[in-house]
Image (tube, helix red, strand yellow):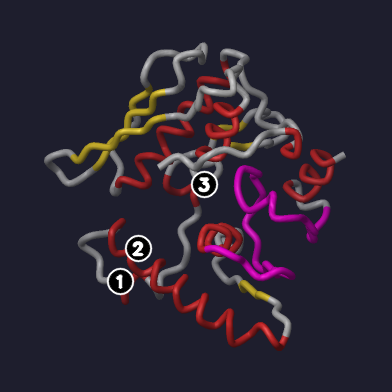
Amino acid sequence: KQEEVLRKFRAHETNLLIATSIVEEGVDIPKCNLVVRFDLPTEYRSYVQSKGRARAPISNYIMLADSDKIKCFEEDLKTYKAIEKILRNKCSKSVDISETENEPIIDDDDIFPPYVLRPEDGGPRVTINTAIGHINRYCARLPSDPFTHLAPKCKTRELLDNTFYATLYLPINSPLRASIVGPPMSCARLAERVVALICCEKLHKIGKYNFWKPYHLLKKHLILS
């Protein structure tokens, strides 16, 4: 039922999706022009991931708050925006941060093409914005004992032309044992996302992971960094 709801939303058969915070990461949905949060984000990760769903060129991101919580949240919001500035500046060293704030959010499809699991109907898709979440979930589902912590490892290196490439290593008990090397990208964070997307494609093609399984059945795991 969950996949059918998402399929209709992706196909634009419906234009309204009411969901829990599970859609913040790991679930591929189309660009939205309006995102409304009924619960305030309690951390930066939640704030930026839900905000990132409003990816249409002209879009609005609205957070609803109880009147007695507004002042407290205003302080949190200042912190979130400060973190956002730092991360943008780090990701695009040569670009003035004041210029990037006024630029529209670039569609992830324009940066690197998504992996479409069923090309005949256009979905589901894995994009650079959802790939890391999929890899973390995959590693969390690998068999392990209570004393073993399974997590992917990603190493990023800078090239002479100031581009970055990333190498991804899955846990030793994954059937995909060879390291995966991604293409050069403009910043380290993009390099990590792209190599995760390439890994998702490889895992699916060897039949080791179904990315459209219901997400409430999957364990939470550490975010790849």
For label 1, the residue is 97
Within 10 Å of the Cα at label 3, are there few (<14), some (14-19), or many (20+) other Cα atoms? many
Which is nearer the eye, 11 or 17? 17
Residue 21 picture quarter: bottom right
- Which secondary structure lies at badge 3? loop
Disc sitting over residue 129 in the figure: 3
Three-letter code for the amino acid on which mark 1 is drawn: Ile
Residue 154 location in percent, x, y? 36, 33
Residue 199 location in percent, x, y? 47, 26
Q: Is residue 53 left or right of residue 81?
A: right
For label 2, the residue is 88
The prevailing secondary structure element of the residues shown in magenta is: loop
Q: CA distance from mark 1 to mark 2?
A: 7 Å
Residue 98 location in percent, x, y? 31, 76
Which residue shows up at 65% across the image and 67% down it? 33
Three-letter code for the amino acid on which mark 2 is drawn: Arg
- Which secondary structure lies at badge 2? helix
Identify the magenta region.
Answer: 14-43
Residue 207 location in percent, x, y? 62, 14
Disc sitting over residue 57 in the figure: none
Number of numbered labels in the structure image: 3
First along the sequence among labels 1 and 2 = 2
Above or below residue 10? Residue 151 is: above
Q: CA distance from mark 1 to mark 3?
A: 21 Å
Residue 86 picture quarter: bottom left
Indicate whether residue 17 is drawn in magenta. Answer: yes
